[in-house]
Amino acid sequence: MTTEEQIVNAARKVFVRKGLQGAKMQEIADEAGINKALLHYYFRSKDKLFDHIFTEAFQQIIPSLRQSLNEKADIVIFIQFFVPFYLNFIQKNPYLPQFIMHELSQNPERIAGLAHAQNFPFDSLKVLIDKAIKEQQIRFVEPENLIINMLALTIFPFVARPMIEQIIFKGKQEAYENFMQKRADDIIQTILTSLRPI
Amino acid sequence: MTTEEQIVNAARKVFVRKGLQGAKMQEIADEAGINKALLHYYFRSKDKLFDHIFTEAFQQIIPSLRQSLNEKADIVIFIQFFVPFYLNFIQKNPYLPQFIMHELSQNPERIAGLAHAQNFPFDSLKVLIDKAIKEQQIRFVEPENLIINMLALTIFPFVARPMIEQIIFKGKQEAYENFMQKRADDIIQTILTSLRPI
DNA sequence: AAATAATTTAACTAAATAGTTAAACTATTT
DNA sequence: AAATAGTTTAACTATTTAGTTAAATTATTT
């Protein structure tokens, strides 16, 4: 692993966990196993390093769906594919959503410069959904609602983990983990049962 | 309005918007229309002031449901009551969820000391849900899932606003606002259709 | 009127932190 | 072997910020 990769890995870890303000350059240097001078030798400033990490993280959290949309041209199959896939990704990066949403909440203009944001294949999904409605495979639903609901059900348990664990599961960590293990199936069931034609 | 109230209002505004680290004592003093010395005269430290605000905010975001649970002993009616009620509260405090979740993500132990956390009438809700299942008013569902899903569908659009506005609604603010105006009905429909007996 | 409490002013301290610098050293490339 | 790039060390600067202090001023209470 090159030094630059070490730095990026360390910066990702610290920034994602602590945010732009909470992260300290010294901690990133320590995490990378180098010193602060070398950190500035590679990335001139904290802001430059942060931009690098944020852009990378943002591109990761916008799922690239083009493949799965062409292959499985059926909204039900898409949902069954997407939910476990995306949930699994977030499970491996549980602090990513909170990081992105916090930084965007602090500085919403940041999203403007990110080309990937416009790259989400929303229109293809819309076509799939409209087709399923017309064929009476699912009830009428606004595509925006369906997509936001799917994302909400998937992402929320991670950003709200401390509250869910404490209040719903009364501090029992294993109860939360057990809940999360079944989560993909639960989301799919909730979405698909809500889409049954009336 | 007393000076202490002015300070608390200013601190709430600044802390909720910028978080513990992002908030500056000088900015709170300015917002309250006083000076930094007086701020420390009332609240000895930033941490003490923050604790005050966070505790207050946390108690607000845990909905007090006891009344509505006793009166309307029917889970469907409860959902129809709770969703618009809670959505309306968050609409008036759109940064509150992000604030709570970010601070808890940074420091999850903070939740332990908050008595209100244990005060959520989860068991009463469970009884309502189990009763509705037994009477075949709704399909079988884990109470934990139902409650978390309701909260997810309600809260997520606020914490993810910048992403939703930019990616789903392509930067059109009025499209997001229009979506949010119909949101209560959409959530109720999603939840209730998903609960139809199989 | 006197005493007390609230508030301002303005300068101060102490700590944290981003970023710089120069010199020395090590590894790699030419 | 010489030159170059990568890395360390350690001390340094500049800035931001929480928190303090003391004196003066204003408002409120007794």
Image (cartoon, coloured by chain):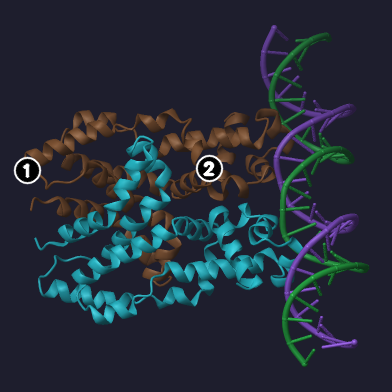
Chain colours: A cyan, B brown, C green, D purple
Please, what is the three-letter code of the amino acid marked with disc 2?
A: Asn
Residue B136, numbered label? 1
How far across and down, in percent of the image, does residue B98 sit? 46, 50
How far across and down, in percent of the image, does residue B140 sit? 13, 46
How many residues crowd around disc 1 within 10 Å: few (fewer than 14), some, or many (20 or more)? few
Q: Is residue D26 left or right of residue B76?
A: right
- Give me the residue at 15% from left, 50% from top: B195
Q: Secondary structure at mark 1?
A: loop
How many residues crowd around disc 2 within 10 Å: few (fewer than 14), some, or many (20 or more)? few
Please, what is the three-letter code of the amino acid marked with disc 1?
A: Gln
State whether residue B173 appears in this view: no
Res A12 → quadrant? bottom right
- Decide: is D28 above or below B28: above
Chain ID at mark 2: B
Q: Secondary structure at mark 2?
A: loop
Res B62 → quadrant? top left
Nearer to me, A172 or A164: A172
Which quadrant would the N terminus of chain A be assigned to in this image?
bottom right
Q: What is the CA distance from the residue labelled 2 to the residue labelled 1?
A: 42 Å
- Give me the residue at 16% from left, 66% from top: A140
How far across and down, in percent of the image, does residue A54 sit? 55, 66
How far across and down, in percent of the image, does residue A175 sit? 32, 41
Q: Is residue D27 left or right of residue C9?
A: left
Q: Is residue A17 left or right of residue A130?
A: right
The answer to whether tags 2 and 1 share a subunit is: yes
Chain ID at mark 1: B
- Give me the residue at 8% from left, 43% from top: B137
- Give me the residue at 16% from left, 32% from top: B73
State whether residue A94 appears in this view: yes
Q: Which residue carries the number 2 mark?
A: B107
